[in-house]
Amino acid sequence: MIGIALVLGLFTKWTAFAGALMNLNYRFAGSANGYMLIAEPAMVFGGAGVAYYRLDHFLLPYLQHLLTRAPQQKPRAMHATH
């Protein structure tokens, strides 16, 4: 899932950070190379300049709009005054 999200550019900084943590865990287990640990900070911190070419450019403003919009007020019932 992390690789697919990185290729599509979906939540790029978070997925690169999660990939770095996974690679670090594999490195501590003794089964991964250390060369990717050098490349992953470049993906985390260098992704700001290419924001237009990834899905984050379109998805994050939409999610921000969904999460920060004000709740809609219910229409009040009209009561007849006598």
Image: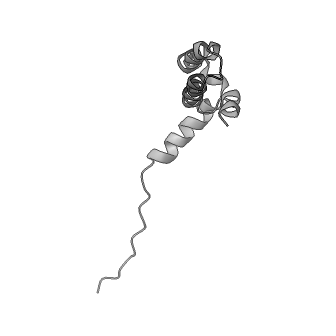
What x and y, as percent, mark residue 21? 54, 27
In front of the other: 23 or 80: 23
In front of the other: 46 or 63: 46
Image quadrant where one finds the C terminus = bottom left
Farthest residue, direction front: 30
What x and y, as percent, mark residue 66? 51, 47
Farthest residue, direction bottom: 82
Residue drawn at 60 percent across, 30 percent down: 57
User: How many marks are shown on the rendered structure?
Assistant: 0
Farthest residue, direction left: 82
Placement of 74 over or under 15, stated as above or below:
below
Q: Quarter-wise, where is residue 20 in the image? A: top right
In front of the other: 57 or 77: 57
What x and y, as percent, mark residue 35? 64, 12
Q: Quarter-wise, where is residue 55 in the image? A: top right
Residue drawn at 65 percent across, 23 percent down: 31
Residue drawn at 50 percent across, 40 percent down: 64
Image-based side of 69 in relation to 38, left or right: left
Placement of 81 over or under 66, stated as above or below:
below
In front of the other: 78 or 71: 71
Image-based side of 82 in relation to 22, left or right: left
Placement of 30 over or under 72, stated as above or below:
above
Image quadrant where one finds the N terminus = top right
What x and y, as percent, mark residue 23? 60, 25
Residue drawn at 42 percent across, 51 percent down: 70
Q: Quarter-wise, where is residue 68 in the image? A: top left
Colouring scheme applied when the structure was drawn: one colour
